Image (cartoon, rainbow, N blue to C red):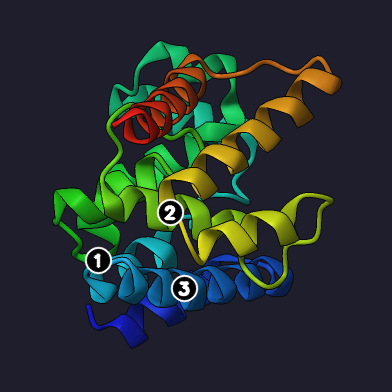
């Protein structure tokens, strides 16, 4: 599929507001990719598909996740299933077989330890695209212009703080990802 065809398929699957968010993520991922030496085509593809399954019902997400054999730990925080499922169905739905693109989609909400540059770009683009409006977003956007890793770590801190304040579950992989990024920040400053 061409990027234009992928765009149209995603547009037909989402409500207008969510699609506008996806367009913002695509634009932001493209810009960050060019800034940090990541393949912009890969970033754009992952950004186009990252929320393809976001508007599915929780029942459908869980059913499809079980059919695909997705790890049971994701059922504790079903809000994360949409990216994982989109990554799994990307070859059939979009002809996207590139594992780097699929992983950037898969981990765009949770992150993971040792994230690739592409994964960081898509994660951050989702958090700071122009339509996002939350207290820390401007600070994270500023840091994103100077230090990709620090911006991703700050974004993860912000998300974890949000979840803690609301006593919502935190996916273990997100904590591992956050700790990995801050440890690397500390190590790079110590040299």
Under circle 3, the secondary element is helix
> Residue 167 location in percent, x, y?
81, 14
Q: Read off the residue under disc 3.
A: 26
Q: Residue at x 64, y 40 (%)?
A: 57
Compute the Cα span from label 2 to label 3: 17 Å
Of the numbered discs 3 and 1, the one sitting upstream in the chain is: 3
25 lies left or right of 131: left
Q: Read off the residue under disc 1.
A: 38
Residue 29, label in figure: none
User: Quadrant where the C terminus lies?
Assistant: top left
> Residue 103 location in percent, x, y?
28, 44
Q: Residue at x 50, y 72 (%)?
A: 28
Instruction: From the image, state whether disc 1 or disc 2 is nearer to you.
Output: 2
Compute the Cα span from label 1 to label 2: 12 Å
Number of numbered discs: 3
Task: Name the one closer to the observer, 3 or 157.
Answer: 157
Task: Name the one closer to the observer, 76 or 148.
Answer: 148
Regarding residue 76, the answer to whether it shows in the image is yes
Q: Are marks 3 and 1 in contact (CB under 8 Å)?
A: no
Rendered position, 60 above or below 74: below
Under circle 2, the secondary element is helix
Q: Residues within 10 Å of mark 1 (few under 14, many from 20)?
A: some
């Amino acid at each position: 599929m061409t990027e234009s065809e992928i765009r149209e398929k995603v547009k037909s699957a989402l409500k207008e507001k969510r699609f506008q968010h996806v367009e913002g993520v695509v634009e932001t991922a493209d810009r960050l990719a060019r800034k940090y030496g990541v393949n912009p085509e890969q970033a754009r593809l992952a950004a186009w598909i990252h929320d393809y399954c976001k508007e599915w019902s929780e029942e459908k997400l869980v059913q499809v996740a079980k059919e695909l054999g997705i790890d049971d730990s994701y059922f504790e925080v079903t809000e994360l299933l949409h990216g994982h499922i989109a990554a799994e169905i990307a070859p059939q739905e979009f002809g996207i077989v590139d594992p780097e693109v699929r992983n950037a989609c898969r981990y765009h909400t949770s992150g993971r330890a040792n994230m690739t540059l592409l994964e960081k770009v898509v994660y951050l683009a989702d958090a700071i695209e122009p339509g996002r409006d939350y207290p820390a977003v401007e600070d994270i956007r500023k840091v994103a212009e100077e230090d990709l890793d620090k911006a991703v770590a700050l974004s993860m801190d912000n998300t974890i703080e949000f979840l803690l304040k609301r006593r919502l579950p935190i996916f273990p992989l997100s904590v591992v990802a956050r700790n990995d990024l801050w440890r690397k920040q500390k190590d790079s400053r110590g040299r």
